[in-house]
Image (cartoon, coloured by chain):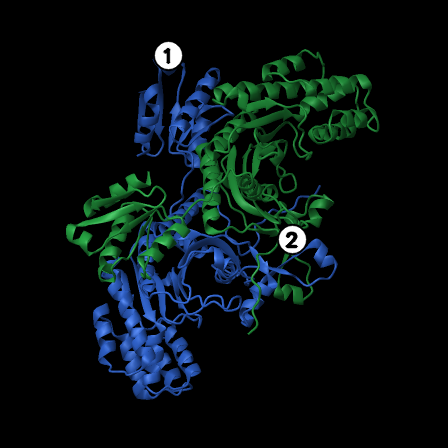
Chain colours: A green, B blue
Amino acid sequence: MSLITPRTPPGTMELLPRQQVAFQRMLDTIRHGYERFGFVPVETPVFETVETLLTKSGGETEKQVYFVQSTGAIQQGHKPELALRFDLTVPLARYVAEHERDLAFPFRRYQIQRVYRGERAQRGRFREFYQCDIDVIGKDALSPQYDAEIPAVIHHVFTELKVGGFTINVNNRKVLLGLLDGLGVDDADKRVLVLREIDKLDKIGVDKVRESLTGTLGVTERAADTILSLIERRGSNAETLEALNGLGIDNGTFRQGLAELTTVIEGLRAFQVPEEAVRINLAIARGLDYYTGTVYETFLNDHPGIGSVCSGGRYENLASHYTKSKLPGVGISIGATRLFYQLMEAGLIKDGGATAQVLVTQMDPALSADYFRLASELRAAGINTEIQLDGGKIAKQMKYADRAGIPVVLLMGSDEKARGTATLKNLTTGEQVEVPLADLPARARALLG
Amino acid sequence: MSLITPRTPPGTMELLPRQQVAFQRMLDTIRHGYERFGFVPVETPVFETVETLLTKSGGETEKQVYFVQSTGAIQQGHKPELALRFDLTVPLARYVAEHERDLAFPFRRYQIQRVYRGERAQRGRFREFYQCDIDVIGKDALSPQYDAEIPAVIHHVFTELKVGGFTINVNNRKVLLGLLDGLGVDDADKRVLVLREIDKLDKIGVDKVRESLTGTLGVTERAADTILSLIERRGSNAETLEALNGLGIDNGTFRQGLAELTTVIEGLRAFQVPEEAVRINLAIARGLDYYTGTVYETFLNDHPGIGSVCSGGRYENLASHYTKSKLPGVGISIGATRLFYQLMEAGLIKDGGATAQVLVTQMDPALSADYFRLASELRAAGINTEIQLDGGKIAKQMKYADRAGIPVVLLMGSDEKARGTATLKNLTTGEQVEVPLADLPARARALLG
């Protein structure tokens, strides 16, 4: 029989166990952070019906969709009825519309699942990746206070992830759209195009942005100056709010956006988020026109090159394709696969080690029943314990523990058995103690630190 | 715009949040149980290359495969290159063969992911469902002691799942195959067919099995009697082993199987598994010829109709399609989606409630900054806390807590604020206490029980 070369499908992230432990820890931290704020879990099937999934006209999205078909359906020449989800937002919309009557609103859900995009495979681009989303969905209305709560969740989660300093950038699309309107850019489509240009500021620089604004987009020099100097100024959040107030722009959208932005900034103190963790950044607009008010992007202070690690915003209506109910919401998403990959590259994530905390070795095959019993006792005391059932040379067993990343080994020979003791050794520190059998769990726990 | 009827794809299990919390708890229990025994996590992509996935000749499996194709590939008339995994065993084989050099053997992995089968949709049959697998893979060899450890893992996990009494049925395919050989059924293929018939004993009864054995399969009346009376007898495990020993069958396979079965049963005491939790059942053979030695099936004592809730066994070589290395292993699988569904139907699983433990209500809008601060303090103390930011009538907020399943609400009006207190109310018991603000976390925890 000729062998098939085993290979992971391209564009996916497959980890060795020690990395998987670290990744799992990251997902757990995110999940427990979300739960700390009372978000409830939702999981949806990996595929949706094509009808559900492809409601959006967007050609780009459709090109990236993976269709799913059984053998039978392919043979019969049917068109695919199912496709893999490409984000968690469409499934959420479908879920909320479908289960509307059974949900308590405001509906706070988190969803940590993989999504799929038929991307050309290239470094750092994934065809399969985890998204960790939260959204709060209101029925008919949703207080802007929820926009203020979101930075508190981001702050909690990224603090727990221990990835160093980070800054949550906040903006409100209404502020700039209203400002543009007030400055005489009276075409709504053009205002959206201006926002998109401004969103490129970090990438292409202020001169190029000014050029397109005053060029093809026909913004006056004076208006462009006002906007760009506003965006370029660095100051405290209070100063930025003051500068916006000081513009004296009499435009409803602008005033509403400014009020919402002020709510978010004022909420920080009440939500115990340090002022320096959040910064008003008028340049961020998020590419998606999906967002209608508050928008968020989060950057690691020491690794700006990674780009935003947590983004999202406020939207007017979640599920207009599926229900007549008005469902406004606000949410964020962490792209965990990409984040993990980049944190590994940046050396910010270490291997997670083993799940086992203690390896019970078999020094003397005659004592195997003792080893089994000791392992059971450690487990009963809540310590993850593995036992080398193959036995063999003790050096080989120690090497296995080291390779697998198990921090502590238990050794017991006939001498120790006669004394009613066993030896615990921490493989990292080399620390070694002989302890009475009755004290094993407590001493193992102490040695694990 | 005409609305699209939102519907979950058929054959999938989608849960409401309170059920999802219960399901998540079940998966966590299984996972932590596996980790307690030192199994390490592995996740593989949802799809494999078609080449990897369809190595097995089995026509049934291939008919059930879901193929995956991007829009571009379909348009260009390409054959599908990817397909959704239909179990976790093929991905494990590919994974171990691909990463062989980087793994520590014996390799103990757990994998909790969804698998896909293009089944005809019907009640209780799923096209997408969770499998929770563990396997121990050896390089070249793997001690039969690992077969003895597996019931300890099953026992631990199902005890933690709190689903009532259960019995782990154990057998060894070599025992019956060797016995049949010893009794003169000298055709190997026929012996396998006999095993499959015997596996149907619970379904079709002893008479029908005897009929097919002595009929088409050509087993002598005497041999059929010997086998069926062995299988039908009820006794302790020790008695069954004694009866097998007493047969005086001089057959290598039989003796090896009996020795392995004895190792498993003798291991129970050492692994602290109660004798009554495990029962030798010579009838179980597992339909799959994949298994070569020990096999396991687990039944809930009070719900035999559910069928086996945890099955598996020993196999000779995991990854012969992908590597020349010999990789024997032993493993089990819990079909968590089906199990959850059936436990719900049997009333053995209750809704999981909310993730939030406390809802901070907003009695008085003027005090919102206080509410935000109290919520943050509860969170900092490790209590999952949600806050009703929309405010509104207190009755509506209480109703929300009840609907969402949040057990405790915090109430504070201006009187309480003046006294430096807040009221905590347990919505289930009705218990209500007014407590000083400094004691809130401790008292909330006490009220949560």
B252 with respect to B75 (left or right):
left
Element carrying mark 1:
helix
Element carrying mark 2:
strand
Viewer-side residue, B56 vs B436: B56
Identify the residue at image location x=49%, y=44%.
Answer: A23
Q: Position of residue A344 (x, y in %)?
A: 53, 41
Pointer 2: what residue?
A: A66
Foreground mark, 1 or 2, reads: 2
Structural crowding at the residue carrying mark 1, measured as other residues with C-alpha within 10 Å and reported as few (<14), some (14–19) or many (≥20): few
**Mark 1–mark 2 distance (CA, rounded to whole Å):** 60 Å
Q: Is residue B116 above or below residue A219?
A: below
Q: Position of residue B187 (x, y in %)?
A: 41, 85
Q: Which amino acid does the dot numbered 1 rest on?
A: Ala
The image shows a total of numbered marks equal to 2
Q: Position of residue A156 (x, y in %)?
A: 48, 30
The chain to which mark 1 is attached is B
The chain to which mark 2 is attached is A
Q: Quadrant of residue A72?
A: bottom right
Q: Which amino acid does the dot numbered 2 rest on?
A: Tyr
Viewer-side residue, B171 vs B440: B171
Residue A187 in view: no
Does the residue at mark 1 contact the one at mark 2 (Cβ under 8 Å)? Answer: no
Q: Is residue B6 above or below residue B68?
A: above
Residue B140 in view: yes
Q: Position of residue A336 (x, y in %)?
A: 54, 41
Q: Quadrant of residue B202?
A: bottom left
Identify the residue at image location x=38%, y=15%.
Answer: B417
B42 with respect to A429 (left or right):
right
B156 with respect to A307 (left or right):
left
Pointer 1: what residue?
A: B418
Report the residue that reaches farthest toward the left: A418
